[in-house]
Amino acid sequence: MAHTLLSCRNVSASVDEKPILHDVDLDVAAGEVHVLMGPNGAGKSTLGHVLMGDPTYELTSGTVLFDGDDITGLSPDKRSRTGLFLSFQAPVEIPGVPLRSFLRTMVDAHDIAMKNKEFKRRTKELAEALDMDTVYLDRELGVGFSGGEKKKVEMLQLLLLQPKLAILDETDSGLDVDALSIVSRGMELYRKECDGTLLIITHNTRILEQLHVDRTHVMVDGHMVAEGPASLIDEIDAQGFERYESLVADAR
Ligand code: ADP
Ligand code: MG
């Protein structure tokens, strides 16, 4: 049995005194792939930010255990060092800083021991695996990058850092077909090379096609209302969230 990597208990969170998450429980075992679904505004992205310790959100109750440690009070930076990763962490553009230098700084900040030669080899290898032209490594970070190239940067970060848990929030990003396949490829590599654990927030069930999904969670109005096997995704694809929305309405 794989050990529990992430465990949220009774997590409630507010923004400007407005409650958004209500007593959320979530368990993710190491090496598993979990999908979080729910209608727009349900609180999925908020949960991602709360798990990373984003100070925008006030935790009003609950605890977050990660790899056996209580991380509830930790800063986003410390959480990142313990092996948590949330997509869209990267600044989109840093003029004057080549992508390669940015990645090097990020690796060093995470205390990952990697000699320069190994770093160069690894970034080149990963860029190629992601179909990224290696000339981008010497370009200023994000400047003039297409949406697809920015996605590749994000996946490069993921694969260099090899976090224990990656939370990928792809719901509102309006990904085109290219970007979708990049995310899909990145997730596959992360699973294969790092035996990584994934929490994927998405409506785009196409990016899940290449993955074996272990558990699906459904959030409505800040409540976790259902949990089930991968087949729940197809059911929601076909029937939408109506059934779950009425569950929350009934509970009120
Ligand atoms: P989802 O990702 O499921 O679409 P969100 O987590 O983005 O939902 O949002 C849940 C609710 O919390 C929405 O009503 C949204 O307006 C509100 N919310 C989220 N973040 C903020 C914020 N920083 N400031 C104000 N309201 C927010
Ligand atoms: Mg969202």
Image (cartoon, rainbow, N blue to C red):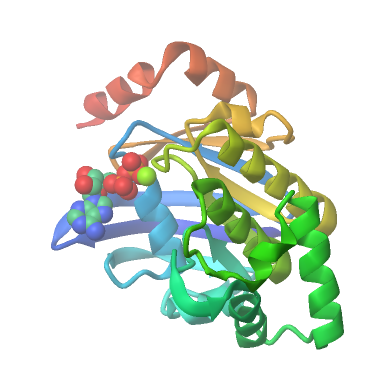
Residue displayed at 67% across by 69% down: 137
14, above or below 67, in the image: above
- Say which of 58 and 119 sits in front: 119
Q: Is residue 23 left or right of residue 148?
A: left
Q: Residue at x 55, y 59 (%)?
A: 7
Q: Quadrant of ligand 2?
A: top left
Between 234 and 193, the one lying in front of the other is 193
In the rendered image, residue 115, in percent from the top left (x then y), is placed at 82, 87
Instruction: Tell me where residue 85 sits by quadrant.
Output: bottom right
Q: Quadrant of residue 225?
A: top left
In the rendered image, the vertical position of residue 201 relative to residue 196, given as above or below? above
Residue 184 drawn at (x, y percent): 67, 40
User: Which quadrant, please, contains the C terminus?
Assistant: top left
Q: With respect to residue 133, does 223 lie above or below?
A: above
The x, y position of residue 138, in whole percent, is 65, 72
Taking depth in this image into account, of 126 and 108 the one nearest to the observer is: 126
Number of numbered discs overlaid on the protein picture: 0
Q: Identify whether 38 is placed above or below 69.
A: above
User: Is residue 77 visible to the viewer in this orientation of the structure?
Assistant: yes
Q: Which residue appears farthest toward the left when viewing the image?
A: 17
Q: In the image, 88: left or right of 21?
A: right
Please say whether residue 194 is visible from this viewpoint: no
For image coordinates 62% across by 81% down, the residue present is 101
Q: Which residue: 57% across, 28% down?
A: 205
